Image: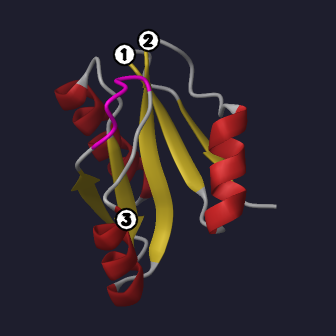
Amino acid sequence: MLKELVKQAFEHAAEEAPRESCGLIVDDNQYIKMENISEDRDSFKMDDKLFALLQLQRKISYVVHSHYGEDSKPSKHDIDNCNAIRIPYLIVSYPDKEYSIIKPC
């Protein structure tokens, strides 16, 4: 199942390139595209209220975002945010189509 969800994340990254895409994997089996409201194309920000609402309604398994034109290695910012919200991150690189998963410490 994860392979199919990663495939959907790559497709979303292709749609949003060169901006970073962002989304959520919920209930371990559904990819939800989220709007990237960041003004910086090389970062992502989700609507806080929508994220909080989804947290109340669904189990968020992964926060997903893309790295355009670079590898999927998490940045220090990615690691810090993952640890802060206590939800694993799935990072996809586009167009390289690699991915990394980081888990909160």
Tell whether 35 sits left or right of 10.
Answer: left
Check disc 2 and give the amino acid type.
Answer: Gly
Tell whether 26 sits left or right of 88.
Answer: left
The mark that comes first in sequence, 2 or 1, is 2
Check disc 1 and give the amino acid type.
Answer: Pro
Residue at point 73% right, 60% down? 104
Q: Callout 1: helix, strand or loop?
A: loop
Circle 1 Cα neighbour tier, 10 Å, few/some/many (<14 / 14–19 / ≥20) = some
Circle 3 Cα neighbour tier, 10 Å, few/some/many (<14 / 14–19 / ≥20) = few
Q: How far across and down, in percent of the image, does residue 44 sit? A: 40, 39
| In the image, residue 99 lies in the stretch drawn in magenta | no
Name the residue nearer the viewer: 21 or 47.
47
The mark that comes first in sequence, 3 or 1, is 3
Which quadrant is home to the N terminus? bottom left
CB contact under 8 Å: marks 2 and 1: yes
Q: Vertically, is 54 above or below 104?
A: below
Which image quarter: residue 24?
Answer: bottom left
Residue carrying label 3 = 48
| In the image, residue 38 lies in the stretch drawn in magenta | yes
Can residue 51 be seen in the rendering of this structure?
A: yes
Q: Callout 2: helix, strand or loop?
A: loop
Tell whether 103 sits left or right of 20.
Answer: right
Most common SS among magenta residues: loop
Which image quarter: residue 97?
Answer: top left
Residue placed furthest toward the left: 15
Q: Vertically, is 74 above or below 26?
A: above
Residue placed furthest toward the front: 39
Residue carrying label 2 = 69
Q: Which residues are magenta?
A: 37-42
Residue carrying label 1 = 95
